[in-house]
Image (tube, helix red, strand yellow):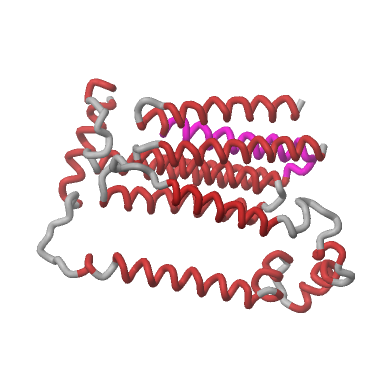
Amino acid sequence: MFVAAALALLATMILTIVRALSGPTLYDRLLAANSFGTKIVLFIAVYGFLAGRPDFLDIALVYTLINFVGTVAVLKFYEYDDSVGGDYQEDDY
Amino acid sequence: MISMEHLIIGVLLAFLVVITIGIIVLRDLMAAVILTGLYSLVAAGAFVVMDAVDVAFTEAAVGSGISTILFLGAVSFTRAEQKPRGNDSWLAIVFVIATGALLIYGTLDMPRYGSAESPAQTHPQLGKRFLEQSADEVGPPNIVTSVLASYRGYDTLGETVVVFAAGIAVMSLLGLKRRRPEEEIPEHAPEDQPPELEQDTDRLT
């Protein structure tokens, strides 16, 4: 069961990496990176049970926090610097 | 189970290769920054699978957290787009490949991953001594900390000196110029923030 879950997570990681590499806008890439962080967290949790040692769950929690901080930092940067998101339109809301 | 572990490590390392190629190919520097954070996350995941949890922790905090923010600061000083390059020199590629081959050649002498015959495993007293005596000899309950800070303390000190020297070099390149202009108002003064925030909340609601 855990093997299947781990393999499925690896497959979704491949999908998010494809999106991060090919994403037309920066926001696609950012969202892909964020969801990839979530996948890594889930993967660490699943792998802990797969290896029989679920002691690393707290590390997965810390990864969640770090991932969140990174995403917020990038978005703050967009908020302050208009020259970066050149392809960004007000209508995109 | 071991083959499963090797499979997962192999897949994660393949992710690293793909992401690295993406970082090299992409012209968009912001995308490269985001992909660098992604790279660190994958590397941290691989470290966790390899049981190097402390290294994974550092990689995630420094590589994915702080480095991303530092790279963002660096990008804010330049343009978000890489200049189109001229002809890439073949000499450079040859040098890079030769250096990489040398580094890989250097790792061939090392014991294999998880090998039971590595010197750290086969040494008669080493691991036993660390496990049994480190609490009395050094103190901290965490043996990794004892090894890092005491048994191989000079090694750690050397690493710290290298990082310190690199920090001084970077500061001497960048930091001295930015102290002097007092008259320049920062681009985003704190005073002009609250109206923007109000606008944003209005838009959201």
| Quadrant placement of the C terminus of chain B | top left
- Main SS of the magenta segment? helix
Q: Residue at x 77, y 73 (%)?
A: B134
The answer to whether B197 appears left or right of A1 in the picture is left
The answer to whether B35 appears left or right of B17 in the picture is left
Q: Residue furthest toward the left?
A: B183
Looking at the picture, how far across and down is residue A49, in whole percent? 75, 37
| Quadrant placement of the N terminus of chain B | top right
Find out whether residue B170 is within the magenta segment. no
Q: Residue at x 57, y 75 (%)?
A: B158
Q: Is residue A87 above or below residue B159?
A: above
Q: Is residue B201 above or below residue B68?
A: above
Looking at the picture, how far across and down is residue B108, in whole percent? 72, 55
Task: Give the image quarter of residue B144.
Answer: bottom right
Looking at the picture, how far across and down is residue B169, in whole percent? 38, 70
Of B49 and B143, nearer the camera is: B49
Of A38 and A15, nearer the camera is: A15
Tell me which segment is drawn in magenta. A30-54
Find out whether residue A38 is within the magenta segment. yes
